[in-house]
Amino acid sequence: MTNTEPSRLSRVRALWELAAASFRRQLRYRVAIVATMVTNVVFGLVRASLLLAAVAGAGGMIAGYDALQASTYVWLGQCLVGVIPMWASSELAQRIKAGDIAVDLLRPVPPAGGWLAAELGRAASALLVRVAPMLALGAITTGLAIPGHAGDWLLGLLSVALAVTLAFQGWLLVNLAALWVLEVRGYLNLYMIVMNLLCGLFVPVSWFPDWLYAITLATPFPSMFQAPINVVLGTGSPWLALGVQLAWVAGLGLATQVVLRRGLTRMVVQGG
Amino acid sequence: MAIIETSALTRDYRRRRGTLRALDALDLSVRAGEAIGYLGANGSGKSTTIKLLTGILTPTAGTVRTCGLDPVPARRRLARRIGVVFGQRSVLWWDLPLWDSFAILAAMHRLPEGVWRPRVAMLVEELALGEFLAQPVRELSLGQRMRGEIAAALVHAPELLVLDEPTIGLDVLSKNALREFLQRERNERGTTLFLTTHDLGDVQRLCERMVIIDHGRAAFDGTAADLARVTGAERVLVADLAEPVDSLDLPPGARLDAVEAAGHRVRLSFRPGEVSAAALFASVAGQARVDDLTLTEPAIEDLVARIYTRSAE
């Protein structure tokens, strides 16, 4: 038996396989995809009409958004709802509680890396099925102000990947509380409310009152949803948005590593 | 060479009131290539031992080496050299075809195509997975899934295969097929088997050595024959007869315990070392027509009780 350290490339292949597996998993549930798409469409139409009414009521412009930009914000957002994990999922907490985390620990891949790879694969499949129908619907119903440059879309895609990573890290941190407490659903729901509000899901974060806007900018939440929309819309510097996202990914990445290490050590040391 | 070596291995769990000693100064040495049956009732310390051996639990005291490694700090390195099958958990990707799980695991273990494809082809052949390779794991029967789980644990050709209650809930045919496969894997590749179960049948057919654990301590370590000698454990054969009988002539080592159902059912005890189940059945069948029969192994709890009674004498 040889124990040579395998190459970096083969490490990437393992994570790639995990992401690809997760991608394929999602696409197996066709009926579920159709159901979420229908929900997405209805939700998008409701949001678009609310925002357009607000813009019209404010005299045609709110915080730099005119009617076309507001509806573009809505439909780009609809491309991302379900791509970026927005709803509370206690899957990992349940794996911890049921002891199935043992299976993850007995695999020769770092657990957080494996989970993130799976999340990115899932997000990619969700993005694939959403983008074309949502943008088409938006173009037909309200019209869209979207970039023509391939480069803008590429930056947007990069920003989406960072947003998914960041949102995943947030959920991971809350789920990891299960290593200390028995029941995490309350924390997950509280986190979901705060995250959904501050990430820019309901209205663009720049519409917030000044005090809330200031608080919001000090959190990672706008980088989870508003940032990729801004990058595609061309609101502000895309490089600044990407830089802020990257900084948050690094910060939360470090935090999850610390929490995971402490939590696993505790589990390994105390049992259960 | 010892593939598993523990010395005074101890593990306590903190409970609301005091501590619970799940494993109490276990000394265990398993040679590479051995097949060891690790038996115990529920809560006896079997799972704790597995967690300590695989590095997902830290010992409270004592030492453990698996494949020469200290399991907790070397957990991921160890994961490349051992395979673990949990009867009650799944390592497979639930909603993907069974084949995909093998491909993903091969990538996780960083195996080149030229290594894992022939290996998986061999496992598919030996465990007869061919007809449901393309089916999502969630659609498989328990027996099919367990065969898949065992193949998954063996994709990377581990030196040590740890099986945690692998036959729980399986029917007799599936159990036999699994046991035969594990026997072959061991003969051909020298894979060490560490099997925990509370089914004595599993162990008797697969393992030449058994360790019985009770309240965190090894109550017995030896061969099946040793166990029968130490405990005098008897197996029980119950036969349903077409015509009623009052009594039977039995070979030495067998005893008629009871005649029930107005003579239509006989309950016989016999010592495994003295008379075989086949010989006893032949003897009964020579005296009456047998409609049905069941064979009961002694329960682990009874064996443990006998071991203690014996050592107290």
Image: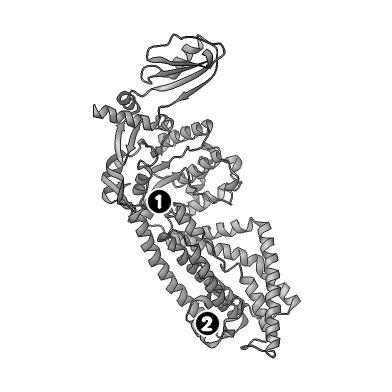
Residue B63 % position (x, y): 26, 48
Measured as percent of width and height from the top left, residue A182 is found at 44, 58
Q: Indicate the quadrant containing the C terminus of chain B: top left, top right, bottom left or bottom right.
A: top left
Q: Position of residue B20 (x, y in %)?
A: 31, 48
Any part of residue B33 in sight: yes
Find disc 1 in the rendering and name its residue.
B80
Quadrant where the N terminus of chain B is found in the figure: top left
Judge by depth and name the residue closer to the eye, A198 or A152. Answer: A198
Three-letter amino acid code of the residue under disc 1? Arg
- CA gap between label 2 and label 1 equals 41 Å
Which residue lies under the disc numbered 2? A239
Same chain, labels 2 and 1 = no
Q: Are marks 2 and 1 in contact (CB under 8 Å)?
A: no
Amino acid under label 2?
Trp
Q: Chain of mark 2?
A: A
A109 horizontally vs B62: left or right: right
Query: Callout 2: helix, strand or loop?
Result: helix
Q: Is residue A198 above or below residue B72?
A: below
User: Is B212 displayed left or right of A64 in the figure?
Assistant: left
Q: Does residue B169 sit above or below B80 in this rendering?
A: above
Task: Identify the image quadrant of residue A37.
Answer: bottom right
Residue B123, placed above or below residue B271: below
Mark 2, Cα crowd under 10 Å, few <14 / some 14-19 / many 20+, is few
| Mark drawn on residue B245 | none
For the point 49% across and 46% down, the residue is B152
Q: The residue tagged with tag 1: helix, strand or loop?
A: loop
Q: Residue at x 44, y 40 (%)?
A: B165
Query: How busy is the neighbourhood of tag 1: few (under 14 within 10 Å), some, or many (20 plus)?
Result: many
Residue B68 visible, this angle: no
Find residue A168 and report its horizontal and vertical position in percent.
Answer: 51, 67
| Disc 1 chain ID | B
